[in-house]
Image (cartoon, helix red, strand yellow):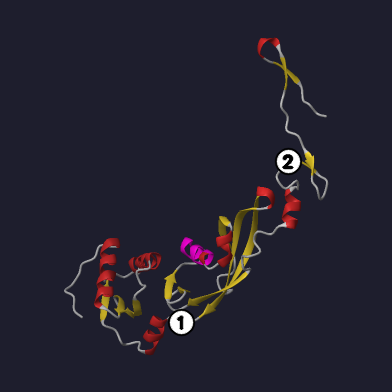
Amino acid sequence: MDGGGLSHGPLGTFQASQTTGTILCCICGVGMPPNPTNMCVNCVRTQVDITKDIPRRCTVIYCSTCGKYLQPPKHWLRAELESKELLTFCVKRLKGLNKVKLVDAGFIWTEPHSKQLKVKVTVQDEVLNGAILQQSCVVDYTVVYNMCGECIRANANPDQWVASVQVRQKVSHKRTFLFLEQLILKHGADKHTINVKDNADGLDFFFKSKSHALSFVDFLTQVAPVKQGNPTF
């Protein structure tokens, strides 16, 4: 028996130092620290799969016209590839996660036009005799293209708009408009836009309601020096 060494205790007495004992795994026989299962980590993983209730394949519906994903039953969510919003959306689509503890989740890179998303999820759960096991699995999401209701109506009646915002700048370059376009896409300010048309000095944005047009104008005034004309609808 490995009892460890001796050390001096109080009043000149001797005490045996404490050492961590080892046991043999009941399946493979490898030496290991004791745990409630009496099995090594590798053998526990062969006996228990805590990811078995997490689906390995899932389907999401995506509108390529406006860049939104369908969040059943009727809500459409705008999210960029590999964004935090899209990851949250994908994870919430997994039904089996309510039976385990989610530890981590992240995208595995795929080609932007592959019509597939891959998410690696890592979960924990209490298994045999109270031992905590952590495992990971990869979920494949198939992206199915389908127009949302707003885009269907806009395409059916492309000229049916209620309000428009005309953005103009009389300069020889387009740098300001390119920068403004990036800001609009980054903040999703175009989410209510039903059509955009080029103009010699700028762009025309069309909306199906006055409130959407006014919200868009408010956004422009916050990100760029803007001079507003009198609104006409």
Residue 6 pos. (x, y %): 75, 19
Q: What stretch is highlighted in magenta?
A: 83-91
Name the chief secondary structure element in magenta.
helix
Mark 2 touching mark 1, by CB under 8 A?
no
Residue 141 pos. (x, y %): 58, 71
Residue 8 pos. (x, y %): 70, 15
Q: Residue at x 20, y 69 (%)?
A: 228
Instruction: State the residue lying farthest toward the top.
Output: 11
> Is tag 2's residue or tag 1's residue first in the polypeptide sequence?
2
Q: Which residue is drawn at 64% across and 58% down?
A: 136
- Looking at the rendered structure, the kind of residue marked 1 is Met
Residue 73 in sight in this render: yes
Mark 2 vs mark 1: in front: 2
Residue 131 in sight in this render: no
Observer-nearest of 218 and 181: 218
From the image, tell me which residue sits under label 1: 147
Q: Is residue 210 above or below residue 22?
A: below
Give the quarter of the figure containing the C terminus.
bottom left
Check if residue 34 falls in the magenta segment: no
Instruction: State the residue lying farthest toward the bottom.
Output: 156
Find the distance from the CA under tag 2 to the CA under tag 1. Answer: 57 Å
Q: Residue 221 carries which label?
A: none
Corner quadrant of residue 57: bottom right
Q: Is residue 112 above or below residue 162?
A: above
Residue 199 pos. (x, y %): 31, 79
- Looking at the rendered structure, the kind of residue marked 2 is Pro
Secondary structure, mark 2, is: loop
